[in-house]
Amino acid sequence: MTDDRHVHIAETDEQIDACFDVMHELRPHTERDTFRPRIRAMQAAGYHLAYVEEGGRVAGVAGFRYINMLHNGWSLYVDDLVVSESVRATGLGTELIDWLRAEAIANDCDTLHLDSGVQRDRAHKFYFDRGFHISSFHFTERLKR
């Protein structure tokens, strides 16, 4: 992290609300009025919402949880990772990945995982450049329309 960038965990309603605009860049289907209640429900199930401010505003967010599965052991799973378009290519994404990796190591995780939509070519290059590799296909079946 640069001297003025620090990762924080959103705990207050104000901190959660401040993350909405950046998260909306990644998850445009999210709505402002349902964002905080949904994050609160996810937090009750183990989700953490990390954020970085730059210039007094949230510039990057990472939603993550700890999971334990037979095929890969204790893991930090990244649900959401986004840096605001206005500050991309400034190193903030790398700093968030580095922080998540350190968080996983500090919590004795065996692996660090994330999924990325098949259409996100720029994100894939970013992840490959930071040591990630494709380890499986993730299959989905929509049950509600």
Image: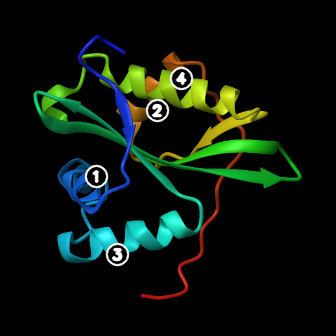
Circle nearer the viewer, 2 or 1 = 1
Give the Cα separation between the discs numbered 3 and 1.
Answer: 15 Å
Q: Residue at x 29, y 57 (%)?
A: 16
Position in image of residue 64 (x %, y %): 53, 48
Q: Callout 3: 10 Å neighbours few (<14), some, many (20+)?
A: few
Mark 1–mark 4 CB contact (< 8 Å): no
Answer whether residue 73 is visible to the viewer in this image.
yes
Of the 4 image quadrants, the one containing the C terminus is bottom left
Question: Which kind of residue does numbered mark 4 sit on?
Answer: Phe
Amino acid type at image mark 2: His
- Mark 4 and mark 3 lie on one chain; the one further toward the N terminus is 3
Image quadrant occupied by the N terminus = top left
Which disc number belongs to residue 37?
3
Q: How many numbered badges does the structure rendering display? A: 4
Disc number placed over residue 23 in the picture, else none? 1
| Residue 112: quarter of image | top right
Q: Which numbered disc covers residue 79?
A: none
Q: Are marks 4 and 3 in contact (CB under 8 Å)?
A: no
Q: Which residue is mark 2?
A: 124
Q: Is residue 92 left or right of residue 86?
A: right
Mark 1 vs 4, N-terminal side: 1
Give me the residue at 75% from left, 35% from top.
109
Q: Earlier in the sequence, mark 3 or mark 2?
A: 3
Query: The disc labelled 1 sits on which kind of residue?
Result: Met
Q: Which residue is mark 4?
A: 128
**Alpha-carbon neighbours of circle 2 within 10 Å: few (<14), some, or many (≥20)?**
some
Q: Secondary structure at mark 2?
A: helix
Q: Quadrant of residue 82?
A: top left
Q: Position of residue 10 (x, y in %)?
A: 36, 50
Query: Which label lies toward us, 3 or 1?
Result: 3
> Residue 74's x, y, as percent?
79, 44
Q: CA distance from mark 4 to mark 2?
A: 6 Å
